[in-house]
């Protein structure tokens, strides 16, 4: 079940993709990580999907990662007399800290943290930015705003406040409950929504611990302002272009996407590009040319993974969407311009033994045209350091920890295998050759580059490179 590509595919499961046969078809079509979106569905729905994925992993004997995406805080208006209102441009409306029915002059907003933080001149977006207002004045339990872009607002529509720093934890009571449930299931990654500050990530880490990787979704201007600090605290990053594209001008999203990918690659941490990648395939068996180009751009930038949301969760063509994304990635990675483009980013080498050895292994493999790099890794860090160089050859990560093997499913270019610890140098070479040939990355006579740490089994000791020619079978 090896993949002939480096960038990975995340697919969201939902009503259109929840039975075991379809989940299996999605995996065969190219999915590396399945996303469980806790904004929708019951705990039992997610538990059932979790069981199906784990059973599939045992069947195909491949680690498959599961990403739990927490909903995070949702700011919504209340309800209206008649269920909806129409806001006309240039009119003024008052938002009130109330839960009673509203009107076109008085909109209920039952979120006290908004009234504590909002200031005159700040923007208010309703219904994914379709309706836009600017705050003109505020008090303890109300604020006034002038309508800049009018339109219809119905019950409980979401609000975005791009200029307002809210005194609001990104982990709600619902998220606490969902997180406990996900940890009990044993998810591999947890995605944190609506992060504003590095402290948000630190607080989440205390709750999540180290059993799951922590992925931070970047979707707020406040997070962009402190992105470098947030990146230091996170295990991986998601460029969540849906909400981000509402909170900042649409024309600014491509530049920020490239900058986030660049910083993540520099830090050696996985980065996911998400939202509306093949959106038209929700209802069409083929994407637009612009969508295909969008996926390819993320691949050229060196993103570790690209993600499908509604396309696989609720669309009419989930398997076709995965298959199309797989084909776009493979065609992009084999294009003549790919290697030059992906290596246009010059990465400074950290002056440590571990980073130097891993980078040297990647360079050696490229120079001698090795078939594969085999990285022995306890924590996954050795494989991550090699992947940071984006070598021209695939990477096999051998780890005794099944959780690490699954988390490495997210890492660019890494084919992870759960394998017991080795006891000595010769066993290391034999195991490397055996797995490289069994997984069909190498054949007898090929060169492979082996990178490991000694003493064996100790995390953070990457200090050894060996070039090995795969032996021919005796006789």
Image (cartoon, grey):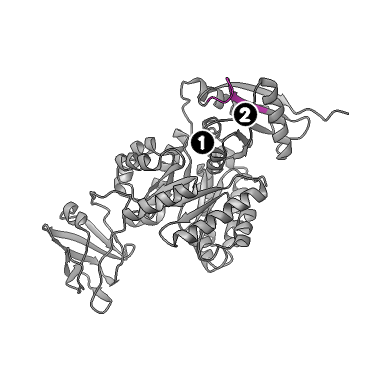
Crowd rating for badge 1 (residues with CA inside 10 Å; few <14, some 14–19, many 20+): few
Residue highlighted by disc 2: 421
Q: Quadrant of residue 422?
A: top right
Q: Nearer the viewer, residue 261 or 140?
A: 140
Relative to 181, say whether 211 is above or below. Answer: above
**In magenta segment, residue 87:** no
Image position, residue 198 (x, y; %): 32, 39
Image position, residue 253 (x, y; %): 39, 51
- Horizontal side of residue 454 vs 268, given as left or right: right
Residue highlighted by disc 1: 344
Q: Nearer the viewer, residue 129 or 395?
A: 395
- Horizontal side of residue 190 vs 121, given as left or right: right
Residues at discs 1 and 2 in contact (Cβ within 8 Å): no
Which residue is found at the position 59% from the left and 40% from the top?
413
Label 1 vs label 2: CA separation? 37 Å
Q: Secondary structure at mark 1?
A: loop
Q: Secondary structure at mark 2?
A: loop
């Amino acid at each position: 079940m090896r993949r002939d590509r480096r960038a990975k595919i995340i697919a969201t499961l939902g009503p259109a993709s929840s039975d075991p046969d379809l989940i299996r078809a999605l995996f065969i079509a190219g999915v590396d990580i399945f996303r469980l979106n806790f904004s929708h569905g019951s705990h039992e729905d997610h538990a059932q999907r979790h069981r199906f994925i784990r059973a599939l992993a045992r069947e195909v004997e491949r680690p498959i990662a599961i990403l739990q995406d927490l909903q995070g805080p949702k700011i919504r208006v209340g309800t209206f007399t008649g269920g909806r209102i129409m806001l006309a441009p240039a009119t003024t409306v008052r938002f009130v800290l109330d839960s009673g029915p509203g009107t076109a002059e008085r909109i209920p907003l039952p979120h006290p943290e908004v009234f504590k933080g909002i200031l005159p001149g700040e923007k208010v977006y309703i219904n994914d930015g379709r309706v836009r207002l600017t705050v003109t004045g505020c008090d303890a339990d109300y604020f006034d705003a002038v309508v800049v872009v009018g339109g219809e607002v119905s019950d409980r529509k979401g609000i975005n406040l791009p200029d307002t720093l809210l005194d609001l934890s990104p982990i709600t009571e619902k998220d606490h409950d969902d997180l406990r449930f996900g940890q009990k299931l044993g998810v591999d990654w947890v995605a944190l929504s609506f992060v504003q500050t590095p402290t948000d990530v630190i607080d989440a880490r205390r709750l999540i611990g180290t059993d799951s990787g922590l992925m931070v979704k970047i979707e707020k201007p406040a997070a962009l302002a402190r992105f470098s600090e947030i990146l230091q605290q996170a295990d991986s990053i998601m460029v969540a272009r849906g909400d981000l594209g509402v909170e900042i001008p649409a024309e600014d999203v491509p530049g920020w996407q490239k900058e986030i990918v660049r910083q993540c690659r520099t830090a050696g941490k996985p980065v996911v590009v998400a939202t509306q990648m093949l959106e038209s395939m929700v209802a069409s068996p083929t994407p637009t040319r612009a969508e295909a180009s969008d996926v390819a751009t993320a691949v050229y930038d060196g993103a570790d993974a690209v993600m499908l949301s509604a396309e696989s969760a609720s669309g009419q063509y989930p398997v076709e969407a995965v298959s199309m994304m797989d084909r776009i990635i493979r065609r992009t990675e084999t294009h003549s311009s790919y290697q030059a483009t992906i290596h246009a980013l010059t990465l400074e080498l950290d002056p440590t033994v571990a980073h130097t050895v891993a980078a040297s292994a990647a360079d050696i493999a490229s120079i001698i045209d090795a078939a594969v790099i085999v990285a022995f890794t306890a924590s996954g860090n050795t494989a991550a350091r090699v992947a940071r160089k984006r070598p021209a050859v695939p990477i096999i990560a051998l780890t005794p920890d099944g959780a690490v093997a699954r988390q490495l499913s997210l890492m660019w270019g890494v084919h992870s295998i759960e394998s017991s610890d080795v006891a000595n140098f010769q066993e290391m070479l034999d195991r490397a050759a055996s797995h490289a040939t069994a997984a069909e990355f190498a054949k007898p006579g090929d060169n492979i580059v082996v990178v490991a740490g000694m003493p064996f089994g100790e995390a953070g000791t990457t200090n050894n490179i060996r070039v090995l020619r795969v032996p021919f079978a005796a006789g």
